[in-house]
Amino acid sequence: MSAPEFSVVMPTFRRPALLRAAIQSALDQHDVAVEVIVMDDSPERSAEPVVASLADPRVRYLPNPQPTGGFPSIVRNLCWPQASGNFIHFLDDDDIVPPGYYAAVRAAFAERPDVGLIYGRIEPFGDCPKEQLEQEIQYFAESARMSRICQRFRNKLAFVACLMFQRALLVCSGGIVRRECMEQTGGFDPKLRLREDVDFYVRVMRRFGVHFIDQVGLKYRIGFPSLMHASELTEEDERQLRQARMHTNSKYKRDHGFVEFYALKLFARGFLRFL
């Protein structure tokens, strides 16, 4: 087996029925060498039979020695140091990588050696109610439009401003990063259970730069209800979202200053909103 170019880091928690399709979508990528690292966060090791049944040497199964009960930032940080590829994809256990996407990403990284993160359009799917799916499709169509606008500025801070203060340009499974980005940022913030992907991608964008490729990069499974667009959140979810936002904002002010922080906020909620 050739050395992997893409390392797919896949935490999983009690979703064996969906896990197989997610893994297979990564293994089916053509013209690239792929490894998949599955870290099982369930104490009963529910993913182990799925990985064993695939019988593919490119897939590694790692049980979490101290299960978190579904705390993705911690599990991803335990898993990614095991990766050996040049590019790391944090693929959730219920999402799908479209055929040929990794080859397109590799070509984009070759053309843009100055960036550390590449992402594409998000295509929602799932068994949720039709109205919810249509809402998600419209949301991510607008996210792609905003990504194209940010790309025209040719400045990573436009992406940072939009992601922090305007809308989700991507979800966790949507981005692929160079390995050195992980080594130099330290990965995900283990204090965050929600919005941990926003915090992570903001730091990567700000430090290493970002490039958007205008093709579908992820088939994103929509659950019911959707935490991102639920009409009503639990009190605990609302509390954790507020805390996560405050934590990310405080770090940004500390690392890059109040002037840049509020300038980006004004840019996102003024100019970008107008566009």
Image (tube, rainbow, N blue to C red):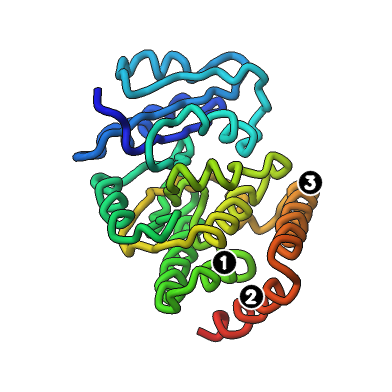
Q: From the viewer's perspective, is the residue at label 3 or at label 1 nearer?
A: 1
Residue 188, placed above or below residue 33? below
Residue holding disc 2: 264
Numbered tag placed on residue 59 in the rendering: none
| Foreground disc of the pair 3, 2 | 2
Number of numbered markers = 3
Name the residue carrying label 3. Answer: 236
Q: Quadrant of residue 66?
A: top right
**Mark 2 closeness class: few <14, some 14–19, many ≥20 residues within 10 Å:** many
Say above or below: 46 vs 150: above
Sequence-earlier tag: 3 or 2: 3
Residue in front for this viewpoint, 181 or 264: 181
Answer with mark 3 or mark 1, whichever residue precedes in sequence: 1
The secondary element bearing badge 2 is classed as helix
- Front residue of 264/174: it is 264
Name the quadrant containing residue 37: top left
| Residue 160 - label | 1
Under mark 3, the amino acid is Glu
The secondary structure type at the circle numbered 1 is helix
Where is residue 62? Give x, y as percent.
50, 19
Relative to 35, is 159 on the left or the right? right
Residue 178 drawn at (x, y percent): 43, 47
